[in-house]
Amino acid sequence: MRSVNFVEKGAGRHVVGKLEPYDQKNEMFKRPHWDPTMQGLRERLHFIQPKPGKNPGYQLTDMSATNAAWRLEMEYARGIRGGRTGFYAWDWDGNFNYPRIAPGQKITTDEAEIITPKVKKAASLFGASLVGICELDRRWLYSHAYLITPEGGKVSSNIVPDEFKYAVVIAVEMNYEAIMCSPSGPASTATGLGYSKMAFTAGLLAQYIRGLGYQALPCGNDTACSIPIAIDAGLGEIARNGLLITPEYGPRVRLAKVFTDLPLTSDRPIEFGVKEFCMVCEKCAKKCPSKSIMYGKPKDEPHNISNRKGVDTWHINAETCMDFWAHNKTDCSNCIRVCPFNKPPGKLHNMVRWGINNIRQFDRAFLWGDDMMGYGKRKNVKYFWK
């Protein structure tokens, strides 16, 4: 059972002053395609294919698993390249091969509370670990979309019509044992599988909503900032590691969303002690191999153009983070691995989650127990494969 407090404001509570629109081309995954200062990083990152190594976690068997995990995302969705195709396609011709739905069919109810549980059930049925709904705060939409192409990249319009007033946010759990092997291959495989599941789930959910006679735009990392929309939808809080922390899985989730004109009932934003615990903990900052995570209090000052101005949070230095990825020959999830909220379900872990939300003075004791129990330590890849 969730131990959370409902609050009135979602991600807007972190906004300082006027929030300027964010251009997607400034996202760190896009900058190597156009920013001259990032060209060296592009050559060193995973845009080239590194040769397998001899160390566990970097061998051919590890790299092959990662490639397999990414397949649906890379071939049938391409959300990290800009989306709007395959499972993330925005258009639909209205036809199904099986089962057929006669043209012009549309649910007739005007009562949002009747259809909302069915939309959530469909999302769970299609693979969502968590699902939340909110009215779309258009401040989180990108000012422009940036699509990665074989020639490099191109800027396109990012027009989400005004009638799309709701967002259905999907969280997909990543494998706990694999993430515990970070920063080596199995953790990268968990990430890739998360992205493939995101596309599969969001694409099917969008098709379900279209079958009801309404419009739906499925999105991965494209079109809008996922984390603030997930906060608005009541899925969690922002943390020091720059990620969404959920009560159920901590930061061990990947996020997708479906924008729709189907009238729905919104969930309420939540708090459960994340900000206060992050102020005491700082484990992700201490264990970050690139020193890309801030210590101390959150600030509204960005490191570089990859951060959003006007947001009071713990900004991540994505430039140094990605530089480590290039050096490591695969991505890194250390900030997820060491986070005390990253625990599988269980009576003890659920009790600690309750304590973090309800007994603030015990935060340091909980943190001490986390260290004593050895949580967050990197697992041996050899045992993962066994």
Image: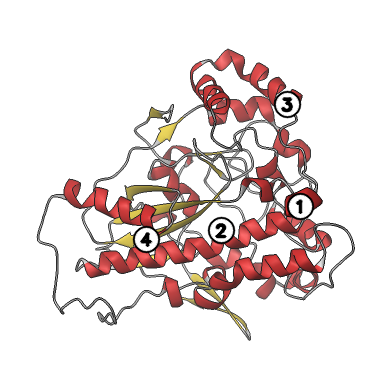
110 left or right of 67 in image: left
Q: How many marks?
A: 4
Q: Is residue 44 above or below residue 258?
A: below
Residue 173 pos. (x, y %): 53, 49
- Disc 4 to disc 2, C-alpha distance: 16 Å
352 left or right of 95 in image: right
Which residue is drawn at the image coordinates 74% and 50% (left, top)? 384
Name the amino acid type tagged 4.
Val
- Quadrant of the image containing the N terminus: top left
Query: Element at badge 4?
Result: strand
- Which mark, residue 183? 1
Name the amino acid type tagged 3.
Met
Labels 4, 2: front one: 2
- Disc 1 to disc 2, C-alpha distance: 16 Å
Query: Element at badge 1?
Result: loop
Which residue is drawn at the image coordinates 65% and 37% (left, top)? 339
Q: Which of 224 and 307 lies nearest the eye of the viewer?
A: 224
Label 3–label 1 contact, CB within 8 A: no
Query: Element at badge 3?
Result: loop
Label 4–label 3 contact, CB within 8 A: no
**Residue hosting label 3:** 373
Residue 240 pos. (x, y %): 63, 38
Name the amino acid type tagged 1.
Pro
Which residue is drawn at the image coordinates 77% and 66% (left, top)? 61
**Residue hosting label 4:** 258
- First in sequence: mark 4 or mark 2? 2
- Disc 3 to disc 1, C-alpha distance: 21 Å
Q: Is residue 371 above or below residue 211?
A: above
- First in sequence: mark 2 or mark 3? 2
Labels 4, 1: front one: 1
For label 2, the crowd category at 10 Å Cα-Cα, with few meaning under 14, some 14 to 19 and many 20 or more, is many
**Residue hosting label 2:** 194
